[in-house]
Image (cartoon, rainbow, N blue to C red):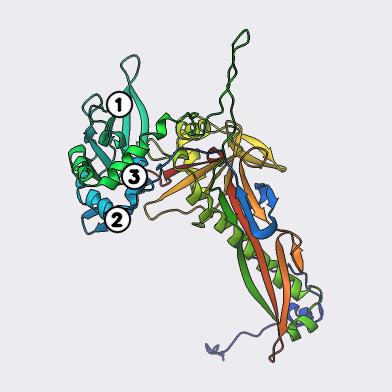
Amino acid sequence: MTVEADPQAQPEHPQQTSLSTAAARNLATTTKSVPQMQEITSRWLLRLLPWVETRGGTYRVNRRLSYTVGDGRVDFIQDGAQVRVIPRELGELAFLRGFDDEEVLKAIADRCVQRDFQPGETLVEGGTSADRLHLIAHGRVRQTSVGKFGNKVAVAVLADGDRFGDQALLDGEGQWEHTATAETAGTLLTLSKDDFDAVLSSSRGLQDHIRNFSTIPHQRQNRHGEAEIAMSSGHSGEPELPGTFVDYDLNPREYELSVAQTVLRIHTRVADLYNDPMDQTEQQLRLTIEALRERQEYELLNNRDFGLLHNADFKQRIQTHSGPPTPDDLDELLCRRRGSQYFLAHPRAIAAVGREFNARGLYPTHVDLGGQQVPAWRGVPILPCNKIPITADNTSSILVMRTGEDNQGVIGLRQTGLPDEYEPGLSVRFMNINERSIISYLVSTYYSAAILVPDALGVLENVQIGRKGD
């Protein structure tokens, strides 16, 4: 007789003969890490900026008097497909800087004519009569000229907010020095000399302003627009030497320290009972300070009042020649200043730089920076910073800078010796213990950044960082 196996029967488990690991952990001391945080980055900008003590919370940048005016970008208003220039933004034109008659500015703005252009379209032809101002609302325009041997030479790449032809409104017999060709589709506004003259003839205030402006170029200046220091050289005998003095800007830029703050809250029970083997208050404070330092670096780059991206001089901002960041673009950044020390770019922009180098068979060298090997171009380290924004159309910016007061470069500002100072320029102040047994600490850090002379910082704008086909 045979006995059939019950299909519902469960197989027997072997009897446990030793203590399980799950139970053993109740008696074991675990090895643990301190709390980890993904937000922490290398923060190269904070590490490399020379920090200058700022007593009184304000730093004043004194410079030589400069006659350079009206070199900013022009902003526009878009209403559907229609684009209009903001009347006050016309003050960015050199000959209208300081002119504040709203009605006259509006009359000039109303005479600007919109022109949409397509890729490859020639906007102006070099050598032809220059009779109008062009304000670029959107798009990229390349300026070229004819070289000494008849070849085409790239002069500049202009983009949103740039302009060309300012002098055409004041000089009725001028000619275009460069050919302007559209690289992308876009929109610009044009103002003809006839339309400008019509407004000029009806406004005595504008006539007086233009007359006063015309005297500025006759004041002696150096190539940077600064008041010239008169001197003589190469003479012999006993000629009368010129007398001189160094004139200063009467309205220097002042930078006030900004602040990043937060309130750290810890329950007394946690602080009293759970401090072995790690101090809970110390770990909470460590992570809070890391977050504040990340915000500090973000503000140093993106704050509209003192952030480097918004305060770079307009003459030190250039456009890429073809979109991606090529070695030629980096060279043009470097050639605009002396003593460049660091490139700063988003990691994805650095990857785009690497692709362009590889496509040309170039391999950047590496330099030692604080014991770490980092890529470099022309001996200038290329450092990552994920605080540099990436736009919706997959473009970013690359910065290059010279640092230090002695170098007339970019500096960080802070004040040390604060009450309850925990780190230089950062304080942790006890606030109170509330009725719910919550301890509160006020964590504050004070900072800013200053650009001592315009060429201390350069920006390569509209850098395309996507791969081809993205």
Q: Say which label, 2 or 3, has the lower sequence index.
A: 3
Q: Residue at x 30, y 28 (%)?
A: 178
Between the residue at mark 2 and the residue at mark 1, the CA separation in whole angstroms equals 32 Å
CB within 8 Å, label 1 to label 3: no
- Residue 151 visible in image: yes
Disc 1 on helix, strand or loop? Answer: loop
Evaluate if marks 2 and 1 touch, with contact meaning CB atoms under 8 Å apart: no
SS of the residue at dot 2? helix
The nearer-to-camera label among 2 and 1 is 2
**Residue 451 x %, y %:** 57, 45
Q: Label 3 amino acid? A: Leu
- Which corner quadrant holds the N terminus? bottom right
Which element carries disc 3, helix, strand or loop? helix
Q: Residues within 10 Å of mark 2 (few under 14, many from 20)?
A: few
Q: Quadrant of residue 297?
A: bottom right
Distance between the alpha carbons at the discs numbered 2 and 3? 12 Å
Name the residue type under label 2.
Glu
The kind of residue on which mark 1 rests is: Glu
Which residue, given by chain and number where applicable, does mark 2 sit on?
Answer: 102
| Label 1 sits on residue | 177
Horizontal side of residue 267 vs 178, given as left or right = right
Q: Residues within 10 Å of mark 1 (few under 14, many from 20)?
A: some
Question: Which is nearer the eye, 18 or 332?
Answer: 332
Mark 3 is surrounded, within 10 Å at the Cα level, by few (under 14), some (14 to 19) or many (20 or more) other residues, namely some
In the image, what residue occupies the spot 29% across and 38% down? 183
